Image: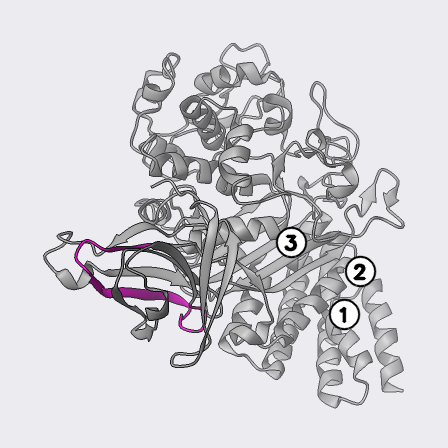
Amino acid sequence: MKRKLLAKGVVWTLVCTSILGSTTLYAKEEVVGSGQITQRILPERGSSASTIINNRECFKAYKGQGTLYLTLNQVAHAKLYVNGKEVDISKFIDPHSNQTVAIDISDLVQNGDNTLQISEIEPYGATIEVNMAYPTLREGTPESVGIDSKVFEVIDRILEAEIGAGGIPGGQLLVAKDGVIIKNEAYGVIKAYDHNGKVEHSIPVTKDTLYDLASNTKMYATNYAVQKLVSEGKLDIDMKISEIIPGFAQFDEKKEQLTLRHLLTHTAGFIPSPKYSDDSYLHPVEIDGQIVNVLDQNNDGKNDVYTQNPDEILEMIERTPLEYTPGSKNVYSDVDYMLLGLIVEQVSGQKFDVFCQEQIFEPLGLTHTVFNPLQNGFNKDQCAATEIFGNTREGQVNFPNIRREVVQGEVHDEKAYYSMGGVAGHAGLFSNAGDLAVLMQVMLNGGGYGNVELFDQKTIDTFTAPSKTNDTYGLGWRRQGNGAYAWSFGDQAPDSTIGHTGWTGTATSIDKENDLIIVWLTNTKNTPIADPAKDVNRMEGDAFQFDAAGTLSTLVYEGIIGTSEEALEESLLQMSLDRSSFLKEAVEKDKNCTEADYKATVALADVLVKKAEKEKDNKEVLRRAKLAYEALPDHSLKEALGERLSKLNN
């Protein structure tokens, strides 16, 4: 049901200060919103043979927030209960009038599911209309939700060390539990490197800084758009693509059977990344012992599906060959979501970015979530930078019109930028942690936020259910499933945890069981390539612990379960020892470890050394620092750390 606002007027507000305590009455003129309960008319006679459920409503709330809006229509008598506790509304009852009463129930609700009951509505024919908004996020402390803030001090120490070592330029971290934002921090700078090397006096990251979300676009733009259209009955996930886009299978009859479900589960058969913007990319694969250039069927040495014209991209997707039988396995492909974005345009009649802005972002009040930020009121200094030399991988890659300057304020992804004008279903969205937290809370709320409903709980359940072929896939959403996504969600995250990652260094996770949101936005791609001869896609920042969110998420869960400060320090030590052991083994096997690998390993040991420098008289802290140092492989960075430790021994 589409949510709407009640008329502006005088609203009487009843504040329940305690279950049996006093109440305060005052008049307030405002627009009263509605959300998860909308225009529910009670009594609801005849809706169910089990009459006990007819006058009840379940709703989600968090301790310390919640307002019911009751419109009393010729009511002479009624009783109101919240979670079985009666709220006295007798003084507002007037059988000769209709009035709206706003009742503060923040002291009566619990985190999660709650029950509203209204009974004994008299006389016959009198009704009460109930409205209630969805929960919204508010600021608080870790202790307010039972988490020791010490865990965030540990996280900050690691980040400080990794930023200091040049691995992570900067980032934004937001953690919310039970509707309370308990950590919202900005770190480092927006641009660490440019053509001349390390940038001196770079602009600090703020909470307003925009980050290129990369593949998180797939969730918070495309999935939300598709979920909204499905919830409204405008799309069906088992609908054939050819029913939506006439002629879609004109170049390959096997595509006639492709459905939205295939795209959402990455089982459509598409090549992971056809590199539409690169005219020389041929996608060579081995078939029956021979190398076949899949994208060069004309044998002219040119990419058959090359285009840098957004008006041609649909045809090139239609021409893109399938690599495997649709539905037989999950192979992550950007093409699936490029196509989904185009489907949203086809069904809605709006450009994809316009639809997302008008139907999702603006209604939620988001001011820092946008495609093509430089064309929409933002400048480069408000955006975190990504690759240093455009898309050239420091001169290793070349194709027509390639960018060579630092990418900043423009989507890094080549297909999105060159072939789709910066607006695509797989990449292109920019945002900050605060806006993303609101979007993520929508999923925890059952589809809405405040006075806005985007989709319903049934749709959420459908989209987050595990794929039959791989339980780490939902419909678009990545899932913890069998634990294979622990590298991002953390080991302790429940199987049902959902979220996504982005190539630029972004990660999001939504844990319904613990009512937990974790947003980690960084730009590790704004660091030099670690070893151009070995892998042009691996930057120095990729070697560091917080490039992926798994360690960060694990530490947050340690805070939830109440891990002691001593145990956290032992975990830090073990992380450092394991990292050193891993690096030593790699060196012995001649795996060509890079300087970045040494920097990242020493950075972890540095976390423990810095604590020893701060707590000089703490022998246990010093012991851990020494163990971390001694485990490091030989390197000049180790020597520098040793000099600092020797001063403590003296």
Q: Is residue 346 magenta?
A: no
How far across and down, in percent of the image, does residue 161 sit? 76, 64
Q: Nearer the viewer, residue 271 or 257?
A: 257
Amino acid tagged 1: Asp
For disc 3, the neighbor class at 10 Å (few under 14, some 14 to 19, many from 20) is many
Earlier along the polypeptide chain: callout 3 or callout 1?
Answer: 3
Q: Nearer the viewer, residue 575 or 27?
A: 27
Q: CA distance from mark 3 to mark 2?
A: 14 Å
Please name the residue that numbered disc 2 is placed on. Answer: 164
- 22 with respect to 468 (left or right): right
Please name the residue that numbered disc 3 is placed on. Answer: 547
Q: Could you tell me which secondary element the residue under label 1 belongs to? A: helix
Question: Residue placed at 58% from the left, 28% from the top?
Answer: 423
Q: CA distance from mark 3 to mark 1?
A: 17 Å
- 439 with respect to 288 (left or right): right
Please name the residue that numbered disc 1 is placed on. Answer: 606
